[in-house]
Amino acid sequence: MVRLKFSVELNYEVAPPGCDFIFNIHAAHTPSQRVLTEMMELGQFVLPRVHTDRATRNRYMRLRAEAGRLRLRYSATVELQHHVGVPESIGEQPVSSLPDEVLTYLYPSRYCQSDRLYDVAIREFGQLTPGYRRVRAICDWVGRHVRFESASTNASTSALDTLHERVGVCRDFAHLMIALCRALNLPARFVTGIDYGADPALGPSDFHAYVEVFLDGRWYLFDPSNTAIPMGLMRFGVGRDAADVSFATIFGSVRAEPPTITVVAIDDPLSGLQLPHRRLEALSTDDGQGSTETL
């Protein structure tokens, strides 16, 4: 089991007459990701409203901010319990046997144009044995063919753009891997969160995007950017692509400062807690059956 303590601080200068925000920075409550403690601090006297999406378990906070400075600080302690699978024993499911709730992750989406990447997917991966190993090959291929470079892309960059330009940040790696998986009829979804264990050379801790692919009744974790340790991935939200799970959607004029994120892992073997480390096994934070209610 992994226990993470983290905080996220966001600062904005809101222009008159104020604006509306929708935030997705609350740790998701799932059977495999337990939120032990959490606190939200707001620098304005506002009345936020938090709701949970029934289909995804994403938690959204809405608020109306007045003109002036707005500061938010969310902190939490979460525990992650991973299912560990043997890669060779994990297969793919035919579309006919997929649970209804995962079908939405088969379709092309705004940033993941899987219908336009079919030829690439078939050429590179069509002859590989279906299963976890093929998905791992897709993940590794994206990591080899795209170079990680901070601030190299923008909010409009899509999987097609990344395939052509061969450079990007974590969300771009995720979009390309998702599009290639969907082109092979593999349900794949975009996940946002934070991570513990990234190389300090990459800069300060930041929000992270990674991928989950549905195989043999579970959502398995993949990080095509290879900048994070999968055991140290903590989830805020899931969606078809980044458009569904922005950490902040803003309706108005603001000046935003870079987020400040801190995360530590608790090392206490006597209590069953371990530091995230790289593993060869397949990892999932899904308790099975494919139900979004248990993710």
Image (cartoon, grey):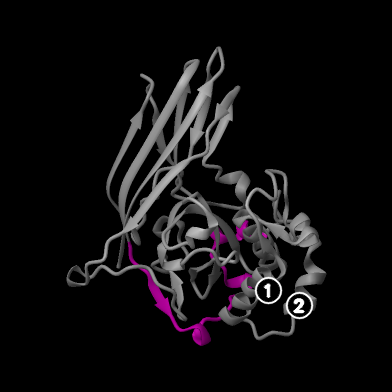
| Residue highlighted by disc 1 | 141
Q: Which mark is residue 124?
A: 2
x then y, percent, for residue 227: 54, 64
Element type at mark 1: helix
Q: Residue at x 58, y 59 (%)?
A: 189
Q: Which amino acid does label 1 sit on?
A: Trp
Q: What residue type is labelled 2?
A: Glu
**Residue 228 counted in the magenta span:** no
Q: How crowded is mark 1: few (under 14 residues within 10 Å), some or many (20 or more)?
A: some
Q: In this view, does 263 lie above or below 18?
A: below
Give the distance between the C-alpha atoms of the residues marked 2 and 1, in whole angstroms: 9 Å
Element type at mark 2: helix
| Front-lying residue, 186 or 88 | 88
Q: Which residue is drawn at 61% across and 48% down?
A: 242
* Left or right, 221 with reference to 139: left
x then y, percent, for residue 89: 50, 86
N-terminal label among 2 and 1: 2
Tell me where the magenta segment starts and ends, as one range. 80-106
x then y, percent, for residue 82: 37, 69
* Left or right, 226 with reference to 70: right
Q: Dividing the image into 4 quarters, which one contains the C terminus? A: bottom left
Disc 2 to disc 1: CB gap under 8 Å: yes
Farthest residue in the front direction? Answer: 201
